[in-house]
Amino acid sequence: MSDDLQSGGLYRESAVAGGGLADPGWLVNADPERVLSVLGGAVGREEVLAAAVYRASAHLHWDVDAGVRRQLLALDAARYGDRGLAARITAVPVEGEPAARWGVDWATGGMVTPQLQHTLTGHTREVRTVATAVVDGRPVAVTVSCYEVRVWDLTTGRPVGQPLTGHTDEVRAMATTAVVDGRPLVVTGGDDQTVRVWDLATGQPIGEPLTGHTDAVWAVATAVVDGRPVTITGGVDGAVQVWDLTTGRPVGQPLTGHTDRVQAVTVAVVDGRPVAVTGSDDKTARVWDLTTGRPIGEALTGHTDWVQVVTVAVVDGRPVAFTGSIDGTVRVWDLTTGRPVGEPLTGHTHEVEAVATVVVDGRSVAVTGGDDGAVRVWDLATGRQIGERLTGHTGTVLAVAAVVVDGRPLAVTGGVDGTVRVWDLTTGRPVGEPLTGHTHEVLAVAAVVVDGRPVAVTGGVDGTVRVWDLTTGQPTGQPLTGHTYGVEAVAAVVVDGRSVAVTSNHDRTVRVWDLATGQPIGEPLTGHTYGVEAVAAAVVDGHPVAVTGSHDETVRVWDLTTGQPIGEPLTGHNGGVCAVATAVVDGRPVAVTGGWDETVRVWDLTTSKQVGEPLTGHAYPVLAVATAVVDGWPVAVTGGWDETVRVWDLTTGRPIGEPLTGHNGGVCAVATGVVDGRPLAVTGSHDETVRVWDLTTGQPIGEPLPGHTGGVLAVATAVVDGYQVAVTGSHDGTVRVWDLTTGEQVATSLPFPAPVRAVAVAPGGELLVGFGWELACLTAR
């Protein structure tokens, strides 16, 4: 047994708990800090699996009680494909808590990986910039999200101090490489036209904000000039300014020459002189002597659109700059002569978003990521592309970093598809599977060594910062995989005697799942050309079908027995289709759809024809649709971004009564049910509330149902134990179950590690939850 496992008696504590590091009771009930300390030394398959399961939602374990932790751990065990461990965790007793109300039958695991070390949460908006530094001997990450800057200890995964706040508008740029009087600093620039300097050790601002720019500050770099630490800033005003970080005063006059926004700044040394290289929306790059404050040579011209990326390297002993542009090219410039080196590097078919440099087999190379979804590697001595483009991302590559691991040069890339990918630059092949966990675009990537291990630090639109071990690690479990982007909707139906789930997703596919086994049935249903937002089930001519709506403006009908499309796509919407429901009108099965074109449309599923004219009245996109029977008449209930709920007579195509008002945010979800013979609608909104409406009178029933702390994105209704309940899912990552007779919540909320966008209740009572990219099936115990 290694010394680190015995440290502090932690291993002994876990072993006494009843089974070592993988003991479910210890995982549920022990303090998270102790658990994470011990799991760092996990050995053997069971312990490694337990470590991966715990880390999957470790950021949520810190501040919740053991009952919530039990539910999360059971879910994450199922995500890793170990249903036995999930069941054992669910059975763990928790002092002061009732037995778990829900068990996890199975879950997909498309977002889990044993390489995830930490998920750092606290930012409430997208994380745009990530950098690393060393503070008091500890590796830290510094992250920017809108108005705030945060510092994180990469060893423990915990925040260091309070957020660095002071900017009064969005923070656009950051640099962390400066040291003044032995203190590590971070320098930030923002839309409030100021530059601010922070002491990373104390989290305190140093001096007053640096003012002088007349518009937003979009680029920051640091350097040493004549022994003085300085920061160089570029602004929307086209100016470049140099500041003395010791005194907080500008050095000389602003450097002028650019005629449009300066988006990028970097520094280099040319003939022993520190220089800055800037890129601008005026389609030029410029080189500045930081000692004299004067431009070096003429502007570097050739790009035909904005220059948004600049980096520097040394090639064959010459300092060179690389500029990436919206025009899709990368250009290389000799900083000694100010002349281009070779021809532009062409190959990207859209704008170049990110550039990094590294040495591969003694050659200086550049790695570029573009809007075309490709990663390309270039030999900087010859100006030629090395090998084929690196493919795998399914959308724009937004961030690139380079690092050397075990002597191998690697590139780490993040993209719009929410994945982080690692590439071996020697072979041009991917290293392992994509690193998944972010639920939206990955905007920033950095690489650093923590405790001797190379790690990547990534930030995304989901507001999280994630830390990944770049070594391949040990495989854990057998996760079910499926969708590769967010699950948007789920419906349940019986096909050939089997209960199945049908899910739709932004990866453009529709998938069918066997609820008993959790296995996919057949191949994904493909044909939509954009994300699939909505799905509903129906029976047409005795066949179970799925009806799907997509951002490609079409509605498609699928035979769930054969997995084949039925007829041609239904067209008519002039915007993405956001919502689908089904009903029977005059004996005919119909689909009711709502879209971004603000209309509601009705389709005859037997003839594949639109029924009547579009139903109009919503002033903004129609986000949700459900159907019901009121006084013997089939109706549709719709919710819109205009904050209203509307009821429509499907026989006449006319609205019933006035819009139902009360929500203070877009109505994202609608479901219908019956309580005491009264038809009801249950609605969820971005205002974080759930409301219940009497469809006979058009009046609200009781007060809004509170509790969610994020927008309510999904609602379903069902009969459980003879009572009509509503199930709601929220951006806050919880599912809540409500008794519609009393308006009270049933048991505690169910936590999930990502926003919940889809919920459904299957005919057998299974609860289906779509969270992030994944689907879980739960049953009441």
Image (spheres, helix red, strand yellow):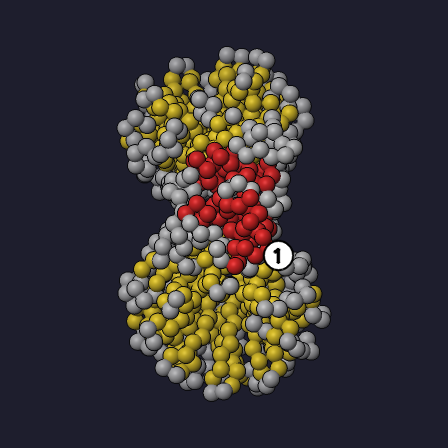
Residue 781 spot, x, y in % from top left: 52, 25
From the viewer's perspective, is residue 458 above or below residue 507? below
The residue singled out by tag 1 in the image is 159
As rendered, which of 298 and 485 lies closer to the eye?
Answer: 485
As rendered, which of 390 and 232 lies closer to the eye?
Answer: 390
Q: Badge 1: few (under 14), some or many (20 or more) residues near its Cα, within 10 Å?
A: some
**Visible in this render: residue 83?**
yes
**Visible in this render: residue 487?**
no
Q: In which quarter of the view is residue 684 placed?
A: top right
Q: Considering the numbered disc 1 on the image, is that residue within a helix, a strand or a loop? A: strand
Residue at point 46% right, 78% down? 299
From the viewer's perspective, is residue 108 above or below residue 370? above
Residue at point 57% right, 51% down? 10
From the viewer's perspective, is residue 583 above or below residue 215? above
Q: Which residue type carries mark 1?
A: Pro
Q: Is residue 404 left or right of residue 8?
A: left
